[in-house]
Amino acid sequence: MTPGYQAVGQKLVDVKGIHETVPLDKYKNYDVPLHPQQTVVQFNSTYLETTGRNERRRGDAVGWGLCLGFVGLSVSNGILYLIVKSTIDFDIVFLSIGLILAFSMILFFAPLINVLSTELFTTWHYPIRFNRKTRKVYVRQYNRKVEVYNWDDLTFFIAYINEDRDIRAVTFDKNGETITGMFALAFQNNVFDKSLISYFEFIRRYMEGDDQQLKEVKEAIRYIYPIHKKRETPLMSFKRLILNVVHYSHENMEYPERTFRFTQ
């Protein structure tokens, strides 16, 4: 998961995983198209709610966990057979081997269950809500804590990290160096800064723009991600998976027919 509340108390240059930063000015109008990137969950004149930074990774833990779990259960059946047969035959050597393997499988399943718990039997999603009227930003972090930020206190920048790039928002203490809070906006990519700026401008214009600009933000939204108060359906997950595979995710995902990727 991306660094968030773990960065509190550090200086920005010391945050693990961030190799380079590009400042963004929330009071500047960027002359770029507005790209919501299919991250909007709720929208009205009071607040804009988007998915969290790791929403597109949701399901990865479950998918891999189920695959590994199937392998683990298959191996466990063999171990159980070995233990039972060794007990019947009074074969101490094979019984000892079976018990050692059984203990190893317990050690295997413990962290697997812990990983699955990050997505199963927990919150539906980890939204970010931008309140235009109160100028507050509400973020549910992966420690399940809801953090509240003053929009005017936030500093934004593009973060270059190991796997790709994303947009970070941070608050600093009085010395302007030590981080008191950090979160990432929903959209990320590993190709162009321009697409990140288009997403940032979509958020920035909602919070800073006048009525005409609010209208522009509304018109940019083509898709509302239907996960408010409910979980993503398997069909929806499949559609988003296909979207990430056959379209350029660093371009305008709100209009995927314009970004279809032809492969040879």
Image: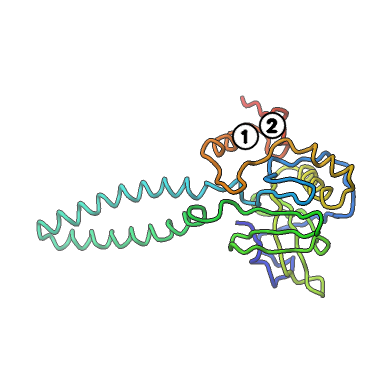
Disc 2 to disc 1, C-alpha distance: 7 Å
Identify the residue at horizontal 64%, vertical 59% (top origin): 140
> In screen coordinates, is 236 left or right of 79?
right
Q: In the rendered structure, which amino acid carries the disc numbered 2?
A: Pro
Report if the CB atoms under discs 2 and 1 are less than 8 Å apart.
yes
Which residue is at 68% across, 35% downward? Answer: 248
Q: Quadrant of the N terminus?
A: bottom right
Residue 254, horizontal then vertical, whole percent = 71, 36
Towards the viewer: 126 or 201:
126
| Residue 196 in the image, given as x and y percentages of width and height | 76, 46
Q: Residue furthest left?
A: 89
Badge 2: residue crowd in 10 Å (few <14, some 14–19, many ≥20): some
Q: Which residue is mark 2?
A: 256
Locate residue 152: give its quadrant: bottom right
Q: Which residue is mark 1?
A: 243
Tell which residue pokes out farthest to the bottom in this image.
Answer: 175
Tag 1: Cα neighbours inside 10 Å, few (<14), some, or many (≥20)? some
Badge 1 amino acid? Leu
